Amino acid sequence: MALLDVKNLSVTFDTPDGQIEAVKNVSFHIEPGECLGIVGESGSGKSQTFMAAMGLLAENGTTGGTVDYDGHDLLHLTPEEHNRIRGDQISMIFQDPLTALTPHMRIVDQMAEVLHEHKGLTGARARALCLEWLTRVRIPEAERRLRQFPHELSGGMRQRVMIAMAMLCNPRLLIADEPTTALDVTVQAEILDLMVELQKQEGTAIALITHDMGVVARMCDRIQVMRLGEFVEQGPADEIFHAPKHDYTRMLLRAMPRIDEPNKGKPLVPVTDRSEPILKVEDVKVHFPVRLDQGLFGKTVPLKAVDGVSFDLYASETIGIVGESGCGKSTLARAVLQLIPPTLGSVSWLGKPIVGLPRKQMIPYRKDLQIVFQDPLASLNPRMTIAASIAEPLRTFQPGLTSRQRKLEVAAMMEKVGLDQRMINRYPHELSGGQNQRVGIARAMINRPRLIICDEAVSALDVSIQAQVIDLLKDLQREFGLSMIFISHDLSVVREISHRILVLYLGRAVELADRDAIYGDARHPYTRALISAVPVPDPRIEKTRQRIKIPGELPSPLDPGASLRFLTSKLAAGDRNYVPEFRKVDVQHWVAEHDPLEDLLEQKAV
Amino acid sequence: MLRYILRRLLIAIPTLLILIIICFLLMYAAPGGPFTSERPLPPQVLANIEAKYGLNDPLPVQMWNYVVGIVTRFDFGPSFIYKDRDVNDIIAQGFPVTLTYGTISFVIATLVGVSLGVLAAIRHNTLLDYIAVGATFSAQALPNFVMAPILVIIFTWQLGWLPGGGWNGGQWQYVVMPVIALSTSYMASIARITRSSMLETLHSNFIRTAKAKGLSTRTIIRRHAMKPAMMPVVSYLGPAFVAMITGSVVIDLYFSTGGIGQSFVNSALNRDYAVMLGVTILYGTLTIIFNLLADVAYAWLDPKIRY
């Protein structure tokens, strides 16, 4: 008998614009102990399906149909009856571990209240069980963590706490709503491993809600593909990936960039002229003062966000910059554009140094140097129509244009980036995320710049839109000979668009090479760990892959020994301030000095 | 935390000094003095009196003597108008009265305001919520100088239940109307801030987690929602308490309670420099202390805040 049996479930929201049907008449079931994947893009209703089952819908939501669990219809329980099931037999973990825990409660209090509520356990016995679970989810120094507050833990640790808390009462079903989307790839790999392990040991069934085909391929036995509130396809994982029947599934699989299979989209434009770089970045450092609570008035120490990074960029070349959160990739981009003044180092554009130029003298360079930001909606002025936003750089750099000429320019650019002419008078909030990102690109492109920095420009977009935007960028590169710095945490996307790739770790470059060399012949242990952590959307490959795991958590950048995590022999020798050399190992291939991977894997966490 | 409090108290010293300097300069710049009256005194007499109070010294010397008096003897100087009383006496007499009904008003405004706000948030978009929102809006629109006469008309003239003014050693009949007049609009503000911040908190992700854990609404409010929802309220309460004490000027005058507000207004009218300065410094000190208390409470509500 199925553990959870959903029949004709529909979810409707009453909004000022009328009724919105988020989930339309879906039926599915979950067997005990299995992992069911629910995949879909944003707005597909995948989360709302389970929110309805958990009684967590917003106040304006109404449901229809039945959700049967163990003879109870979850949609028609009183709150008291529901409270006896949720948290005990069915538990849930959420996407954003930063906000999902109560900020003012200690970890032990948040966990123990579940035991108190459902099992009547309190005091030392509850505490012991909490400690046992924190250890099982492999939280380092579990004993100390019990007394800590959520903000004192890293994102990965918080998600582990969420999982431990959800597992406390040995639930029969664990609902995981995008559990790893907000985490770095290496952390994601560890969290997914942990969930697989718990599923096996405890026999807990898992409902995994995600947009990431790679994650599903790795985790799930069966998959439901959801789109616009309906299931378009369902079946065993192998069938969905290797013999998809529905066009939408096929489209999703095609659009998803793969780390093991580049050039899924349009081919890259080859770089023809490598004689003279157009952009030269030399030993750039950006340090921020951080106040520590020491002494009566505190003490200031530098946080080395970027600590000596160099690279060249040639005409019509794209360099990808990858690294996990906090590695300094966005800071580096801003330092290149002089949006943050670098503390040290030089940046030259077409042979002329631009570091330290007064604001006024920098303005002419801004015409050539543009940036597209991550959050398309937040980076556009909400009070300007999109046409006005796109036209604004024209007013600055080509003040001679008449308003008619400007209109024509804007119209031409909108057509290039695939925006409908009828949208000129719309405001950003009236457009979708993908459309807004096109506006951001059009605004950056309108003066035909020679360099565009894309700072996580496609990260917030659904895969299908993401693929379109990447193709668009490649087209623009071909047409205008544009150079790009493409910053992303997503290694598959970077591989798709970049000629060369620079890997950053805590403000320092660890590897720089041609894209095929980075993915085929990575030398640095960090690069290798990063690449092996990226899930591949193919269950056959995923279930047999070996991963490289560097022991330990990402250290704090304030820790002076942090940058020697891959050169612990120097650390052991007591040389804490040693700066690893960046050595050339091949044509166009540089690697930072490091200990052999085998030694690093053997050692305990630093 | 202790270090932070110490640091804040250290900063309070220059702050108060600057306050004294500004007050001195303002009064120096204003024409007239405590001994100018309609019938001018003979110049020699005036000079003698001014010499007695040190008013003919250069301004920096006056300030120096004043500050030294406070620091060494906790002496705020003599009143220029009431010959036999000094500032310490005047404050010691009026301040307890103001503090008494100010504190009662503060406690009532906070308790009622917070409860009303939380209740309205839990019963969001129900009749109770609408009534609470309506009542707080009306109450906020009533300043205390309108509230006071209305209360007197109803309770003294019409019903004859309460005395229309006086203090009488703080007998309860004399305290009721000052407290109502002073607390109503603050109560309304507190209720409104509590309601909106509680609503916001109830929509946050960690409340969703708490619901998914199977906790009852009562537990969720008490353990998870209350502290974060109180943060904006607390930052309002510090300044609000000081404003209630200083804003009691109207109450003191209207109900003739004999509180410090009355002395403050009189001293300003009479150019009684010493009393004015003394009361200003008292208000300044209160402001500093209560903002500090609010910040300390903040750190208790949110462990992320570490000073």
Image (cartoon, grey):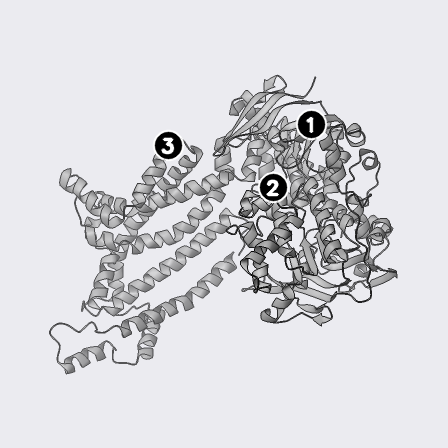
Residue in the image at 44% along x and 62% along y: B9
Q: Which residue is mark 1?
A: A232
Residue in the image at 21% along x and 78% along y: B50
Q: Residue furthest left?
A: B39
Q: Quadrant of residue A532?
A: top right
Q: Is residue A296 above or below residue A465?
A: below
Left/right of residue A151 with respect to residue A313 in the rendered view: left
Dot 1: what SS? strand
Query: Do badges 2 and 3 share one subunit?
Result: no
Q: Position of residue B171 (x, y in %)?
A: 22, 45
Q: Which dot marks residue A107? A: 2
Dot 2: what SS? helix
Q: Check if mark 1's residue and mark 3's residue have beta carbons within 8 Å.
A: no
Asked if one can make out residue A193 in the rendered structure from this viewpoint, the answer is no
Q: Quadrant of the N terminus of chain A?
A: top right
Q: Is residue B37 above or below residue A181?
A: below
Q: Which residue is mark 3?
A: B128
Q: Quadrant of residue B273?
A: bottom left
